Image (cartoon, rainbow, N blue to C red):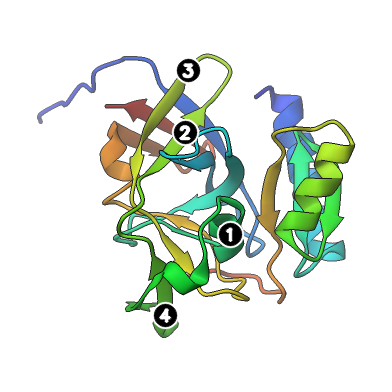
Amino acid sequence: MTKNEVIELKKLDKRVKKDFRGKWVAREGFELIAVADTLKEALRIAREKGVDKPIVRQVPREKHRYSFF
Amino acid sequence: MSETSLPKSKFIRQYYRSVYGQILMPVIVISLATSKRRTIQITTECLLDSGSDHSIFSFEIADELGLRYKNALIETGVGFGGRFRFTSFPGTVFLGTVSDSSLTHSFEMHPRFHEPGSDAPQVLGRLDFFNAFEHIEIFESGKYVDLYPA
């Protein structure tokens, strides 16, 4: 990834955490392609938009600053 | 004073992200498929976690790969939040793929899955992710990870 892509991805992560808690999000590069309640629906929306291999994940439902795993 | 030089071979670089808390953490983009249905592949993001024995993905990913909860083995483990339940599919061989613009590495995995409905984090553990690489370098100051395929 280029430095610019890393920066754009960080902006996307910040927006996703703020606006889409608990949702499944699909992206292509640093572009948000789909937001849905289920993975199945997020994949369907992505495929409808012509993105065959989106990168998907579920946004945590709760907000917190630190993580310990 | 002794010095150790690591072999300089090709690697896959992945950058830190803040996908859980506010702090940047080592997140890996990985594609998962089963050996029986390799054309169905889900690409997702997981925390690189040396404290985890196994990798754990969301159950919705298992579902999209054609696996059903009624066929899963339910197990319990212990994590930072205490005891928790997870599922596995002992008879299924999974294929993990990690890549960047110059290199692709595919390997066998035996991940676990969270219970349906859980939004617990997805992690990549030692026994089925770390051991697919000759070594993994974590650059905390630079906020990236270099993965050297085995």
Tag shown at residue B113: none
Q: Marks 4 and 2, how far apart in space?
A: 26 Å
| Residue farthest to the bottom, as pictured | B82
Label 3 to label 1, Cα distance in Å?
29 Å
User: Tag 1's secondary structure?
Assistant: helix
Report the amino acid beneath label 1.
Asp
For badge 3, the amino acid type reads Leu
Which mark is on residue B63? 1
- Give the distance between the C-alpha atoms of the residues marked 3 and 2, in whole angstroms: 10 Å
Numbered tag placed on residue B103 in the rendering:
3
Depth check, front residue: B142 or A5: A5
What residue is pinned by disc 4? B85
Q: Mark 3 vs mark 1: give the one in front.
A: 1
Mark in the foreground, 4 or 3: 4
Q: Residue B117 in the image: x percent, y percent? A: 63, 76
Q: Which residue is mark 2?
A: B97
- Tags 3 and 1 both on a single chain: yes
Q: Quadrant of the N terminus of chain B?
A: top left
| Residue A22 in which image quadrant | bottom right
- Classify mark 1: residues with Cα within 10 Å, few (<14), some (14-19) or many (20+): some
Which residue is depicted at the point 29% across and 60% down? B53
Q: Earlier in the sequence, mark 3 or mark 2?
A: 2
Q: Amino acid at mark 4?
A: Arg
Q: CA distance from mark 2 to mark 1?
A: 19 Å
Answer with mark 4 or mark 3, whichever residue precedes in sequence.
4
The chain that hosts pointer 4 is B
Marks 3 and 2 belong to one chain: yes
Where is residue A8 drawn, in percent x and y? 79, 36
Label 2 environment density (alpha carbons within 10 Å; few <14, some 14–19, many ≥20) = some
- Nearer the observer: mark 1 or 4; the answer is 1
